[in-house]
Amino acid sequence: MSNGPTYDPFEHADRLGVNVLFGRIRTANGLWVAAERTIILKRGLKTWHERQVLTHELGHVVLGHTTTEHRFERQANRWAARKLITPGNLAEVVKMSPDPGVWALELGVTDDMLALWFHDRRIA
């Protein structure tokens, strides 16, 4: 896909002065430690999943979240969906297949994140 710039969460973390570390996490794929300005990503994630998790965690950073609450998770998912899915890139993958599962795969996001992106477009 080449329609529009690709969001680079590692570069964004660097610009924000946020450290990104890899470690053993048992309860999640990523963790924002606000007091340390550090995001910890679970070791061994596939590249597309790592990118999505880091973007989600950066959502917590940008939105000012310092605690873990269910509503914050949803907000961070929405923020990440807007960063990872662009209308131009979505238009390209829609031409490839009528299957939303293929769209998510090609965009490097989960089916849930793609569904959230569409949901937000319907209510906007």
Image (cartoon, rainbow, N blue to C red):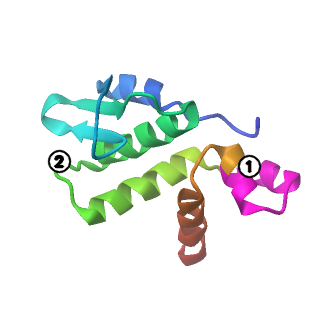
Considering the whole magenta stretch, tell me its main secondary structure. Answer: helix
Residue annotated with mark 1:
88
- The picture quadrant where one finds residue 28 is top left
- Mark toward the start of the polypeptide (2 vs 1): 2
Q: Which residues are magenta?
A: 90-104
Residue type indicated by callout 2 = Thr
- The label on residue 3 is none
Residue type indicated by callout 1 = Gly
User: Residue at left 71%, top 45%?
Assistant: 106
- The x, y position of residue 45, in whole percent, is 47, 33
Q: Is residue 99 above or below residue 108?
A: below
Q: Residues within 10 Å of mark 2 (few under 14, many from 20)?
A: few
Left or right of 84? Residue 30 is left
Mark nearest the camera among 2 and 1 is 2
Left or right of 99? Residue 115 is left
Residue annotated with mark 2:
66
Task: Say which element carries label 1.
Answer: helix
- The x, y position of residue 104, in whole percent, is 66, 52
Task: Say which element carries label 2.
Answer: loop
Q: In this orientation, does residue 87 appear?
A: no
User: Residue at left 57%, top 36%?
Assistant: 48
- The x, y position of residue 31, in whole percent, is 28, 40
